[in-house]
Amino acid sequence: MIEPGSGISSYQKSHRSSPPQDYDGSDVGDVGVIIKGRVYPYIEKNPLDLISLTGFALGGTVGLSIGLLPCSFFKNFNIYLVAVSVFHFLEFYTTAKYNPGKVTSDSFLFNNGKAYAFSFVFAVSEALLESLFFGWKTSFPTWYHTSAAILGLILMFLGQYIRTSAMITAGRSFSHQVKTSQNPDHVLITTGIYAHLRHPSYFGYFWWALGTQLWLLNPVSFAVFAYVLWRFFHSRIQYEERYLNDFFGEEYTKYTQRVAVGIPFIN
Ligand SMILES: C[S@@+](CC[C@H](N)C(=O)[O-])C[C@H]1O[C@@H](n2cnc3c(N)ncnc32)[C@H](O)[C@@H]1O
């Protein structure tokens, strides 16, 4: 897990003996270093062998899922695997490009807790089991099966777009872990997608995840995801906003009065 900033820079922590002359000593956040005025990822938290293998596995999953589409009996499942792979790839890529001081191998967001892994296995199991036993899953017999799948696909595109836009807009103020102490480079973001949604990356993920279950025509997982994700984001937003109020005071309070969250029943 990423440690919160503690006043002494990550570079100083890891290179206590002799920093190079072009190191300007600034604390850029959690794990990055500044060399010649540019922020670089901290190498010890970015094992290149693991990162390249993860990239290969994600690319391989996309390639295989698309390549096997013609002989797949449940094509929505192949597209689902593509969407999940693209999601995990974009988590790392966007952090690496727009927030390099905080990128680590955890930025792929695979180590996201037991509940996350369990919900993936649950959704995949439901999709595959039902597709074996229920014809409606693969043949879309009525307009509402087709409409649910199309709505799911739209939510997946929209949710992914909004989540990635949020990470790009927030830049160095974004972190996968909620900050409980303010880093020197943490500024309040209220522009771009944050002018329309108060927690766009949560909004994006919430609707993306529900979209995947509509696309898979997974009624049980859809209900479970809706309940679990709503509860998770409800408490996470309350927790996160306590610290944002501490960091930014009245400016943040005014922002919360002006901009909504966009997840039902979360104010
Ligand atoms: C996983 S990011 C999620 C950001 C935001 N909740 C969202 O959904 O787009 C969590 C970090 O973002 C920071 N954060 C949330 N909203 C912010 C804002 N409007 N400006 C700056 N930082 C923000 C929090 O302090 C937290 O450490």
Image: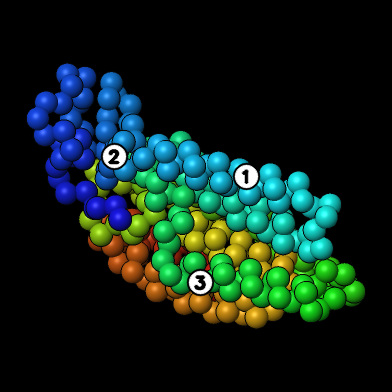
Asked whether residue 43 appears in the rendered view, the answer is yes
Query: How far apart are the two marked residues, 2 and 3, measured between alpha carbons?
Result: 29 Å
| Residues under numbered marks 3 and 1 in contact, where contact means CB atoms less than 8 Å apart | no
Query: How far apart are the two marked residues, 1 and 2, measured between alpha carbons?
Result: 26 Å
**Eyeballing the image, is 113 above or below 144?**
above
Task: Decide which of 135, 95 is in the foreground and name it.
Answer: 135
Residue for badge 1: 60
Tell me which numbered mark, 3 or 1, is placed earlier along the sequence. 1
Residue for badge 3: 118
User: Where is residue 212, by image quadrant?
Assistant: bottom right
Asked whether residue 154 appears in the rendered view, the answer is no
- Left or right position of 78 against 261: right
Percent position (x, y) of residue 249? 27, 59
* Quadrant that contains the N terminus: bottom left
Please tell me whether mark 3 sits on a helix, a strand or a loop. helix
Rendering colour mode: rainbow
Residue for badge 2: 44
| Amino acid of disc 1 | Gly
Please tell me whether mark 2 sits on a helix, a strand or a loop. helix
Task: Decide which of 229, 19 is in the foreground and name it.
Answer: 19
* Residue at 66% across, 65% down: 211
Tell me which numbered mark, 1 or 2, is placed earlier along the sequence. 2
| Amino acid of disc 3 | Phe
**Eyeballing the image, is 181 above or below 21?**
below
* Residue at 43% across, 70% down: 114
Tell me which numbered mark, 2 or 3, is placed earlier along the sequence. 2
Residues packed near mark 2 inside 10 Å, few (<14), some (14 to 19) or many (20 plus): few
**Eyeballing the image, is 257 above or below 85?**
below
